[in-house]
Image: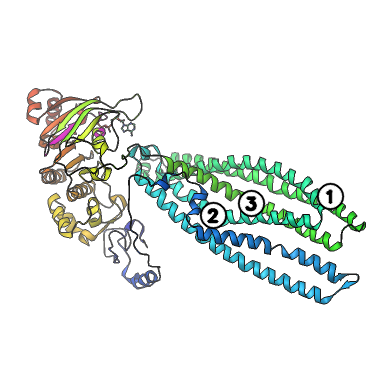
């Protein structure tokens, strides 16, 4: 399911399983046009019905998830498919070798002097046909089995990687480019799928075929077989080792570089507005050409290595066959070998080389798959920096007393951002953080929410160190309204009921009235069922902010952390937001990262932060009377007409 791209489509969050007709005028895409509805219904009715899966999420990985990712562990979970796949591979590798033996038998017993027999030739011919058809049927079965195995393994892996992303901490996503992570989920997982679907079975089949043929060659003629093993195999072996080293380097390089291409692409698409507004198109193209060029170079290197290996192994095989022909021919003349046996030997010899050729081709898939496994293993082994203790208890329902106790923190080692912060926020108290940009206000909020852990000191909620309780119970009592309100593709209703399960429509309608969104909802064609686009691009900044406030209100947190948007709003929106805030903050403790002095003035207490420390603290009245940093900021604000942000003036 899931049509409709950014529009959320049907059955998605907003659709509630119903189709959305495109009467959402004013939005670029609001659902399925009514004239297509019948056709769409038909298509959907043909889709397989999947039972909703029972999802459990735990912050801590299970014992099996802690083990490093290996191909063996991945396929081990599906023993039935592995067993059938292996059995079929063995049978196929044996069945396919019957042809030359039948040829040898037909020549020696049906075509040579004294042994002429049409019956022998006909029976051998029919058996040849039976073996060919049987082999094809078995191969088809094998492809079905390995295809299913690959699909199941990939499904598990996709879910596992996604779950891992849900567990990782904020610093991981800050450090890693989104595009690189996307490439792990796309190209790396696809490589693995290819490997399991075709690579391994083909590799196993060719390897087994070589083993079977080696036995058959020795059983046909020991002298010729020994020459083959002494002459050709060592050369191929040495050459294959060179290829292994060279191509591994190439594939690792190309994996890294495709990740860079995807990272650059996603960044450019994400920031397309900034790119266009700043006329950065040409520079962006240059940059993209650079990363795409690096990827091309890596692919060309791999191509060169393949171009050397493939033809050279062919050449070694052909020269070897020439030498063996002269040795075998002499043996026939000396009556040490029958013609049938020589022909069979050469037929087998060709079959001995073709697996080598195929192995070379499959080797690419194997290399790609191997480097993808390495990357995915590394990814799955990164552990969240903010971790939950094993069997961490839930945080009991709190009153809302938040304490920063000697808290120091830095994102990078040796570069402290906050130093020795001591602050207590009483239950129900709202505290505004003000200060210049980069002072550490948002960092304080991130520590309060346990997006990061302090380098030293503790953050306590009702006297409990937040590091010791389960993250789920902690965050279910904390509400965060970020500076940039993020809306997901889906209906307004789904976006609002994000923070808590089981929110009723009445509660949503109530929240809409509380934050003053009624006007907006009434203007929208389908009210709260209207689909908003990914990241809420079809809404105004103020509207997005109000939706984020409504979301926080509905989550009913005990402590609210609000990082006020820096973008200036018009007076009317500001008034609506101030009013919404008054309602939402009722009876709640709150940290307000205030960029508007009107917000700071409404708080019970103001904390002025500068250079990673608290420089001033008190009620708005006290701080104004004191005539310190905050008073200076306030006076400058008044002089500028009361429309400046707080931080630049400290
Ligand atoms: P503003 O009002 O502009 O949002 P702020 O007071 O909230 O500023 P913070 O976001 O807390 O400031 O940042 C404090 C310092 O930490 C800044 O110097 C910033 O550059 C740095 N910083 C923030 N996030 C990171 C990060 N993920 N990695 C490294 N340094 C960071």
**From what the image shows, is residue 536 above or below residue 274?**
below
At x 32% / y 53%, what residue is drawn? 56
User: Quadrant holding ligand 1?
Assistant: top left
Q: What is the spatial separation of the Cα atoms under label 3 and label 2, in whole angstroms?
A: 15 Å
Examine the rendering and report whether any part of residue 59 can be seen: yes
Graded by Cα atoms within 10 Å as few (under 14), some (14 to 19) or many (20 or more), the crowding at tag 3 reads some
Instruction: State the extent of the magenta-drawn residues as a range.
Output: 426-443
Which numbered tag is attached to residue 323?
Answer: 1
The residue under label 2 is: 196
Q: Which residue of the protein is positioned furthest toward the right in this rendering?
A: 334
In the rendered image, which residue does mark 3 sit on? Answer: 361
Sequence order check, earlier mark of 1 and 3: 1
Question: At which x and y percent is residue 99?
Answer: 74, 65
**Are the residues tagged 3 and 2 within 8 Å (C-beta)?**
no
Cα distance between the residues tagged 1 and 2: 38 Å
Along the viewing direction, whichever of 45 and 425 lies nearer the viewer: 425
Which residue shows up at 43% across the image and 41% down it? 381
Residue 602, position as x, y percentages in the image: 10, 37
């Amino acid at each position: 399911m899931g049509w409709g791209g950014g529009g959320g489509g049907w059955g998605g969050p907003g659709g509630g399983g119903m189709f959305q007709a495109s009467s959402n005028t004013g939005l670029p895409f609001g659902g399925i046009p009514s004239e297509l509805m019948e056709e769409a219904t038909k298509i959907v009715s043909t889709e397989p019905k999947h039972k909703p899966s029972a999802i459990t999420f735990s912050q801590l990985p299970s014992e099996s998830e802690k083990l490093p990712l290996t191909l063996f562990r991945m396929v081990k979970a599906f023993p039935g498919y592995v067993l059938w796949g292996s059995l079929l591979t063995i049978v196929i590798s044996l069945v396919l070798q019957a042809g030359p033996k039948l040829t040898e038998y037909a020549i020696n017993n049906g075509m040579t002097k004294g042994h002429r027999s049409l019956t022998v030739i006909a029976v051998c011919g029919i058996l040849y046909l039976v073996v060919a058809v049987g082999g094809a049927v078995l191969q088809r079965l094998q492809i079905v089995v390995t295809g299913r195995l690959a699909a199941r393994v990939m499904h598990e892996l996709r879910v596992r990687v996604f779950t891992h992303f849900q567990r990782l901490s904020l610093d991981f996503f800050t450090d890693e480019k989104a595009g690189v992570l996307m490439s792990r989920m796309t190209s790396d997982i696809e490589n693995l799928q290819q490997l399991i679907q075709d690579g391994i079975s083909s590799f196993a089949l060719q390897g087994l075929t070589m083993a079977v043929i080696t036995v058959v060659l020795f059983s046909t003629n020991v002298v010729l077989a020994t020459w083959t093993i002494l002459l050709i195999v060592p050369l191929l072996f040495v050459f294959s080792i060179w290829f292994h080293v060279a191509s591994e380097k190439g594939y690792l390089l190309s994996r890294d570089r495709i990740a860079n291409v995807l990272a650059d692409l996603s960044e450019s698409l994400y920031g397309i507005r900034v790119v266009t507004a700043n006329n950065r198109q040409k520079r962006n193209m240059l940059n993209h050409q650079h990363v795409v060029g690096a990827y091309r170079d890596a692919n060309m290197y791999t191509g060169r290595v393949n171009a050397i290996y493939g033809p050279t192994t062919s050449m070694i095989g052909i020269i070897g066959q020439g030498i063996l022909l002269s040795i075998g021919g002499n043996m026939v003349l000396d009556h040490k070998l029958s013609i049938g046996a020589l022909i069979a030997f050469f037929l087998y010899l060709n079959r001995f080389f073709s697996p080598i050729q195929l192995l070379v081709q499959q080797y690419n898939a194997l290399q790609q798959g191997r480097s993808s496994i390495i990357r995915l293993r590394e990814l799955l082994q990164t552990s969240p920096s903010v971790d939950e203790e094993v069997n961490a208890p839930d945080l009991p329902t709190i009153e809302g007393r938040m304490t920063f106790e000697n808290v120091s923190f830095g994102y990078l080692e040796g570069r402290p951002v906050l130093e020795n912060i001591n602050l207590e926020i009483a239950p129900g108290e709202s505290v505004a953080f003000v200060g210049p940009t980069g002072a550490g206000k948002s960092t304080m909020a991130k520590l309060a929410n346990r997006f990061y852990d302090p380098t030293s000191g503790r953050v306590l909620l009702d006297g409990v160190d937040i590091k010791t309780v389960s993250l789920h119970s902690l965050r279910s009592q904390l509400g965060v309204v970020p500076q940039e309100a993020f809306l997901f593709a889906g209906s307004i209703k789904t976006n609002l009921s994000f923070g808590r399960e089981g929110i009723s429509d009445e509660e949503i309608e109530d929240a809409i009235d509380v934050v003053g969104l009624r006007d907006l909802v009434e203007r929208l064609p389908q009210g709260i069922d209207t689909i908003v686009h990914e990241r809420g691009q079809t809404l105004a900044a103020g509207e997005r902010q109000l939706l984020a406030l409504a979301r926080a209100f509905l989550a009913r947190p005990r402590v609210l952390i609000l990082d006020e948007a820096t973008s200036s709003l018009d007076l009317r929106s500001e008034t609506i937001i101030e009013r919404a805030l008054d309602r939402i903050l009722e009876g709640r403790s709150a940290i307000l990262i205030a960029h508007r002095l009107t917000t700071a003035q409404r708080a019970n207490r103001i904390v002025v932060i500068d250079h990673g420390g608290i420089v001033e603290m008190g009620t708005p009245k006290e701080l104004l009377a004191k005539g310190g940093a905050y008073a200076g900021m306030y006076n400058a604000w008044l002089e500028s007409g009361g429309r400046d942000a707080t931080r630049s003036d400290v």
